[in-house]
Structure formats: structure tokens, C-alpha cells
Amino acid sequence: DPRELRDIVAKNIRERARQQKMSLNRLADFAGIARSPFFRAMSGEASFTLDRLCKIANALQCPPHLLLEQPRGESKQD
């Protein structure tokens, strides 16, 4: 389900940003993504492009595939 994957990506981005003590505004700026499309994707109204996911992963210093993974300890029904 695309909506479920968008939620997983947003949750992973929030968690990784929190771990690095980086606000989402700062993350969007650091990744070079305009805030409006960034927050539309974070809210599930839109999807991140592959290019934007790679920019975010680079800003968070993690491999892009980690942003797509179901968080540990959570089932698909959570």
C-alpha cells in the first residue's frame, strides 16, 4: 500500500532527524528541498521522489534504503 510506505518513510525520517537533534525545517534546508513539498510529503499528501529521498538520506548520513524499512518492533498493523 503506497500510503503505508509513505507513513513508514516519514516516521523513519522523523526518528533519524530526532536522533541527530535536527529539526525537520533544518533537514529540509540541509537536503536542499523546499519546505512546502517536503512537509507535504511528510504529512502523506504527496510522495518523495527518489532523488529527494537520496538527498534526505545524505543529509541524515544514512543509506537511502534505511528510510524505506519498517521500524523494528513494529508490525504493519501498528
Image (cartoon, rainbow, N blue to C red):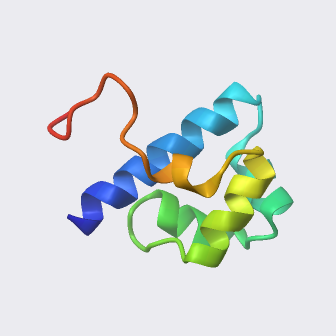
Q: Is residue 4 above or below residue 35?
A: above
Spot occupied by residue 23 in the image (x, y as percentages of width and height): 73, 41
Q: Nearer the viewer, residue 68 or 4?
A: 68
Q: Residue at x 79, y 62 (%)?
A: 31
Label count reads 0
Which quadrant, please, contains the N terminus? Answer: bottom left
> Which of the 4 image quadrants contains residue 56?
bottom right
Foreground pick, 43 / 62:
62
What residue is at 77 percent from the left and 56 percent from the top? 58
Q: Nearer the viewer, residue 15 or 57?
A: 57
51 vs 6, left or right, is: right
Where is residue 36, by image quadrant? bottom right
**Looking at the image, which residue sits at the far top?**
73
Residue at the far left: name it. Answer: 77
* Location of residue 77 in the rendering, given as x and y in whole percent from the top left corner: 14, 38
Residue 3 vs residue 67: left or right?
Answer: left
Residue 48 vertical placement versus 16 (above, below): below
Q: Position of residue 27 (x, y in %)?
A: 76, 51
Q: Residue at x 49, y 66 (%)?
A: 41
- The part of the image, by quadrant, that contains residue 18 is top right
The percent coordinates of residue 44 (x first, y second) are: 39, 63
> Which quarter of the image is occupied by the C terminus?
top left
